[in-house]
Image: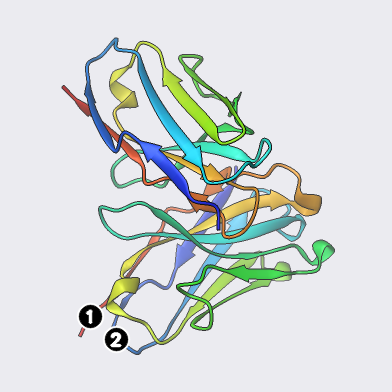
Amino acid sequence: DIQMTQSPSSLSASVGDKITITCRASQTMSTYFNWYQQKPGKAPKLLIHSVSTLQSGVPSRFSASGSGTDFTLTITSLQPEDFASYYCQQAYSTPWTFGQGTNIEVK
Amino acid sequence: EVQLVESGGDLVKPGGSLRLSCVVSGFDFSDVWMSWVRQIPGKGLEWLARIKSKTDGGTIDYAAPVRGRFTISRDDPKNTLYLQLSSLETEDTAVYYCVKDRKSGGRDPFFDYWGQGTLVTVSS
């Protein structure tokens, strides 16, 4: 199984901050790598797919990059609606696996 | 508009069974793979099972914790995905999400649509 190690597990930030979340996979997975956002009480929402492609409707303050086993999600100028949990996911081989999640809280 | 609507979540005793359903609309259900993902309250996401489209052989895969206890199936004419849960344990208490997986041929390998979730509580 491919293990996904996501960090940090939580962070405190303010509106306008730039934040970065990292995810490390236990093996390479080409571009089969995605990011999801989840708000309390809601289903997760696809944010970025195929390492760096923004899903339709996702604001351009979100960006992502990576290759091999190391991937990052960056939010420039954090907005109030961005306080949520974020999960990385590999879609290369089953079992599809998620990172442990990163919860962004208000500082 | 794409919709995935789960139902069937309930309170069930340890050792019991339950069947979850997910009715889909807004896309060609028969042309996509479908998955179930669960989330223990306050915890992260856990993929459980995937069923490929019939075009791709209808192949099924399970996560180790549920293999042999859960069964995924699909009824394409009814646009419905199912998850049969058996031998339930308290650790299976979670919100269960129906998820649109990739398209036939493995195209678009990401979960772009999720249901609202249905809560399964396993408790005596």
Q: Nearer the viewer, residue B103 or B8?
A: B103
Could you tell me which residue is drawn at 34 percent across and 13 percent down?
A18
For the residue marked with disc 1, what is the amino acid?
Answer: Ser
Is the residue under label 1 in contact with that under label 2 (CB below 8 Å)?
A: yes
Q: Quadrant of the C terminus of chain A?
A: top left
What whole-number distance in Å separates the C-alpha atoms at marks 2 and 1? 6 Å
Neighbor class of circle 2 (other Cα within 10 Å; few <14, some 14-19, many 20+) is some
Query: Along the horizontal axis of the image, is B82 left or right of B52?
Result: left
- Could you say whether the residue bearing mark 2 is in a helix, strand or loop? loop
Tags 2 and 1 both on a single chain: yes
Count of numbered labels shown in the rendering: 2
Q: Residue B123 has which mark? A: 1
Mark linked to residue A85: none
Which sits in the foreground, A97 or B17? Answer: A97
**Type of residue at label 2?**
Pro
Q: Which residue is at a point 53% across and 83% down the rendered structure image?
A: B68
**Is A52 located above or below residue B80 in the figure?**
above
Residue B85 position (above or below residue B26): below
Q: Is residue B38 left or right of residue B21?
A: left
Identified at 55% across, 58% down, the residue is A1
The image position of residue B123, as x and y in percent, is 23, 80
Query: Residue B113: percent from the left, percent from the top?
Result: 56, 46
Q: Quadrant of residue A5?
A: top left
Location of mark 2 (residue): B14
Which chain letter matches label 2?
A: B
